Image: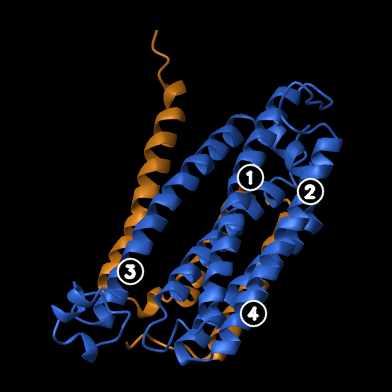
Amino acid sequence: MPNGAVAAHGEHQNHHPALQHHFEDLEQQHEASTLGMWLFLVTEVMFFGGLILAYTLYRIWYPAAWALGSEELNIYLGGFNTVVLIGSSLTMALAVRSAQTGARRATVGWLLFTMSLGLTFLVVKFFEYKEKFELNHVPGPNFRFEGAESPHVQIFFSLYFALTGVHALHMVIGFVLLSVIATMAYRKRFSPEWYTPVELAGLYWHFVDIVWIFLFPLLYLVDRSHRIV
Amino acid sequence: MSGHISPKTTYYTIFGALMACTALTVGAAFVNLGDLNFPVALTIAIFKATLVILFFMHVKYGTRLTWVVVLGSVFWLGILLVLTLGDYLTRSWLTFG
């Protein structure tokens, strides 16, 4: 520890070790951190918003292709993953709550539970992708789909892979993030006075959940009952 | 630090509501509502997202500034969607002479 820097602050002993000096108190610091996280999430909303805009536009142009493409997706796997991901949001919220009340073991436990649900989601997604490769439904030179709508169905699958791929990438990042937070919690880094990283990781995880709440109906469900062709 | 601590029952209730909405949206997908399938699915998704934002993400107990940022993201997303779709979907109207 740099002794000179500490000596320059006479009251250093009197405040919480997590408090940074440019903040009045921990509450102000927590509010600033939360606000920063939300601003980041706004950029994420715009990022996914652009892709969803492309999805919406092409859906309006090629409704028949959208009905065909959406029927190819496995509603049971998609629905299972929706339950898994919303469940992981519940366990994440309980992890944050445990950190708030200072229940260290429960915090670590709920975080590990959340991570295993996240992993379950990714494993299911892997098998969904694998099936698409086997059926040649992956856009590119090997794409094959019967019927006149084939080129437009390829656009549907391009957006399917772009949206779910970027979402899965966020899940992987979230998984790594939670492993760091779980390690910190295990090492007694958090207390009811300071648990900001747990809360912020929670915000990120819930955001990724919200993205899926929109992707599931848009990709798997919405055109299921419209057999135009 | 005085962060709001929600009772566990709140989280379980919200989870139950989210599950019920998921069942509803899956059920609605198998009924042909014509043009209404899309708005119905979107409305349920927006409702679910609102529950997550308010209770899981603690915005209900957040500062006024957090509210401004959250509503700001919705507003900016609205600009992105409305203006772009407003352009593309009205181009065919321009069929003069």
Up/down of A195 relative to A218, above or below: below
Cα–Cα span, label 1 and label 3? 29 Å
- Label 1: chain letter: A
The amino acid at mark 1 is Gly
* Disc 1 with disc 4 on a shared chain: no
Q: Please tell me whether mark 2 or mark 4 is closer to you in this view.
A: 2
Up/down of B64 relative to A153, above or below: below
The label shown at residue B16 is: 4
The answer to whether residue A73 shows anywhere in this view is no
- Label 4: chain letter: B
Whether label 4 touches label 3, CB < 8 Å: no
Cα–Cα span, label 1 and label 4? 28 Å
Q: Please tell me whether mark 4 or mark 3 is closer to you in this view.
A: 3
Whether label 1 touches label 3, CB < 8 Å: no
Q: Position of residue B76 (x, y in %)?
A: 34, 49
Name the colour assigned to chain B in the rendering. Answer: orange
Residue for badge 2: A128
Q: Position of residue B31 (x, y in %)?
A: 74, 55
Residue for badge 1: A165
Regarding mark 4 in the picture, which secondary structure is present there? helix
Near-viewer residue (A214 or A89): A89
Whether label 2 touches label 4, CB < 8 Å: no
First reached walking from the N terminus: tag 1 or tag 3: 3
Near-viewer residue (B6 or B93): B6
Q: Quadrant of the N terminus of chain A?
A: bottom left
Name the colour assigned to chain A in the rendering. Answer: blue
